[in-house]
Amino acid sequence: MNDFSATNTTHEFEQLLNKLLHEKLTATEDERLIQLLETSPELRRVYVDHVWSDTFLKWTFCESSDQAPADFGDLVEANCGTKPLESGLPILISPKSRRRSVFLGAVGLLCAGLSVFLLSLLLLGPGENAREPVETVGKIPRLPKFVAVLIDSEDAVWKEPDSHMEYGMSYREGDQIELKSGLIRLAFHCGAGVVLQGPALLELCSDAQALLHHGKLAAVVPDGAASFTVLTPDMQIVDLGTKFGAEVNASGQASVHVYEGEVSVQPRLGPSLDEALLLRADTRPKFSQIHNEHPGISVVSVDSNDIASVPSLEQLRLVRSGQYPPHARTVPLAIPVTSPQANPSALPKLSQNKVWLSESFYPSNSLQASTDRAHPWIVDGKFSRIVLLEEPLCWQSLTGDSFVMELDGRDPAFPSLCNRLEARLPQSLQQDFYFSFLGRYHGLDPDDFFSLWFDNILGAGISHANMPNVGIRFGDFFARMRLDQYAATAVIDGDATFFLVGQLQKLGKPKFSRISLWINPELNTWGPPHLEVEIPMRSGPMSLSTLGFRMGKDTEPDDKLWLDRLLIGYQLEEVLHSTGDTKGNSDPGLDLDPIHPRQEGLE
């Protein structure tokens, strides 16, 4: 979550908490408050502090009673007009008068202490106490345990379209997770990690057991974690220290695939077998109820070729420590660009063709930021920065500036999606256009991934896989309009310096349907594109209003991607001019603005 989003969330939480304390919270607002509490340990701590203080004060000044009912729940109802904890959360009590009561002051202390205890169990996330059942006290019901945490997601489409899911939110036992498509990663409190791929329905039975009604999952149980069990409608799969996959079709028939270690399989219905079926990765890795077939089960992410893209061990350890997700690290910055509103005379090298957007990542010495020239980006401050290269990036006659944007690879403890740099465009792109940028990838391996994407939404948890993308994937340059419409060609240089030129077209129709990519083209003898992908015209986006760069799941933390000279224009010539001279110095005609913090302008 970036600083701007965090500020909005904090402000929303404060408003909802104030309404709660003044008993003006609606049912919808109550649900939203619970969602916020489930996604942030810090908000939960603030909530508990306020509830403790408010409950203590209100009980202290609650109306006195001549006769105390024998039952604690009746005591609360008789004196303050409501029962405690009917919905699993404390209902704050409004006093009927301001007369002090010594007896009820003592009861107030008891209630306040009980509230803190129950709130700690309910809200403080995946700690040790959250795993223990809460026994019934009087009329206080047993609270469901927190059993799992959402680590991240990729292109997840939930059954409920308005589902508000954020990394780090907790799930309780009995919760059901239904995905229409995409995948999510979960960490169970027993130590196991699960990746679920839609369409799927998963029921969380406990912190060490889940029921897969239908769909596909893969699980990993690292050393030192408790046993983990996956139930299907009529099978029980128990891990014995392993990594395995399970798939259940629409009729309830299941398949199992052991990637590492071993699992035991027992029927859930009918008599138990004298000996469980033992599956081992090295001898008998697969079993299926479907016509004796033994298909392999693959649960892969957008940018990984792992057969089972399960949560990393670093993520699982971080969840168990109670510190997931890692602290917010994104910061909004205004990086200078030339926007469509810029004066064409400021671009002497492009005087004949007005470029639509130009970004050189050059920090000017100007002390004044011009609102029509400063283009706001969301920059991952922990893993991205502007640096000065000894030699500028260049391709043939094109030369960038010595200043470039540097992006690091992915830290395995952080969510798998790594949007390092993203922004909302000054205007939506609604007609055919060209784009280009200079880049260099240091440390390129066959499993590395990066892309420039175009979309209409922003957010740390959005993969943009089903929108136009170009970049490097699995050792190839690639272009795609969506995940299943893809073209690629091999990268020649392992330490790749490249100049990419692309075009997005509507082909005379309302929606963008074709992407073309030139890879290190000969500038003097322009030829056909190296890659071209076309989708049905009804499937593409009508306009594009955001763009960004992301790094892949399997990139190493010390990988470096350097970017410079990002251009967008409506004519090819507009994106083939350099923003700097042959010495790598900034073009003085651009009059770029300085980088400075910005708190608005982006979601």
Image (cartoon, rainbow, N blue to C red):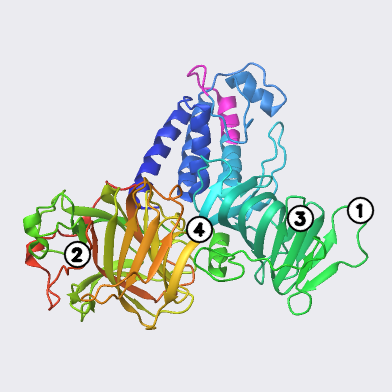
Read off the residue under disc 4: 324
> Looking at this view, is 216 or 52 the one in front?
216
Q: Amino acid at mark 4?
A: Tyr
Q: Amino acid at mark 1?
A: Gly
Q: Residue at x 6, y 57 (%)?
A: 345
Give the magenta range. Answer: 94-111
Indicate which disc, 4 or 3, sits on the residue closer to the N terminus.
3
Instruction: Tell me the CA gap for discs 3 and 1.
Output: 15 Å
The magenta stretch spans residue 107: yes
Instruction: Tell me the CA gap for discs 2 and 4.
Output: 47 Å
Indicate which disc, 2 or 3, sits on the residue closer to the N terminus.
3
Label annotation for residue 270:
1
Q: Which circle, 2 or 4, is nearer the viewer?
A: 2
Indicate which disc, 4 or 1, sits on the residue closer to the N terminus.
1
The 10 Å Cα crowd at callout 3, few under 14, some 14 to 19, many 20 or more, is many
Q: Amino acid at mark 3?
A: Leu
Instruction: Tell me the CA gap for discs 4 and 1.
Output: 41 Å
Instruction: Tell me the CA gap for discs 1 and 2.
Output: 73 Å
Expressed as whole percent of the image width and height from the top left, the position of residue 520 reads 30, 76
Expressed as whole percent of the image width and height from the top left, the position of residue 12 reads 40, 38
Q: Is residue 440 above or below residue 467?
A: below
